[in-house]
Amino acid sequence: MLEDINVKELRCEECGSPNVVARIMGKYYCFKCGSKIVKEHLRKQISIMKEKGLIFDEYEANLENAESN
Ligand SMILES: [Zn+2]
C-alpha cells in the first residue's frame, strides 16, 4: 500500500547508484558521492570563512609542521 509513496526510486544524484545513504541540500547521494560532496562543501565553507577572517591558519600550520617532522 505504501510502496507507491515511499519507494520512489531513490538514486544517487551523481552516479545513479540505488545505494542512497544521504540527503544533501535536497538531493540524494550514495555514500561515496555523498562524502565527496560533504568534503567539497566543507572545503568551500572553510575558504569562505578564511576570506572573512573568521578562522585562522593555525590549524593548517600545525598540520604542515606535523608533516615536516
Ligand atoms: Zn553516487
Image: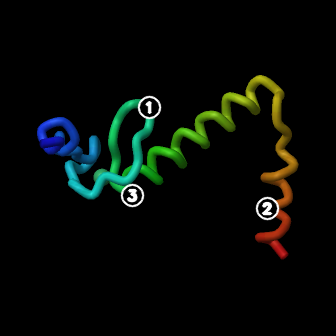
Give neighbour class at mark 1: few <14, some 14-19, many 20+ (Cα, 10 Å).
few
Side of 28 relative to 42 (left or right) = left
Mark 3: which amino acid?
A: Phe
Residue 1: x percent and y percent?
12, 42
Q: Earlier in the sequence, mark 3 or mark 2?
A: 3
Mark 2: which amino acid?
A: Glu
Taking 12 as reference, is 53 above or below it? above
Mark 1: which amino acid?
A: Met
Task: Establish whether ligand 1 lies closer than 8 Å to the Cβ of label 3.
Answer: yes
Residue 8: x percent and y percent?
17, 40
Q: CA distance from mark 2 to mark 1?
A: 33 Å
What residue does disc 2 label?
64
Q: CA distance from mark 3 to mark 1?
A: 15 Å
Task: Establish whether ligand 1 lies closer than 8 Å to the Cβ of label 1.
Answer: no
Taking 35 as reference, is 28 above or below it? above
Q: Nearer the viewer, residue 52 or 68?
A: 52
What residue does disc 1 label?
25
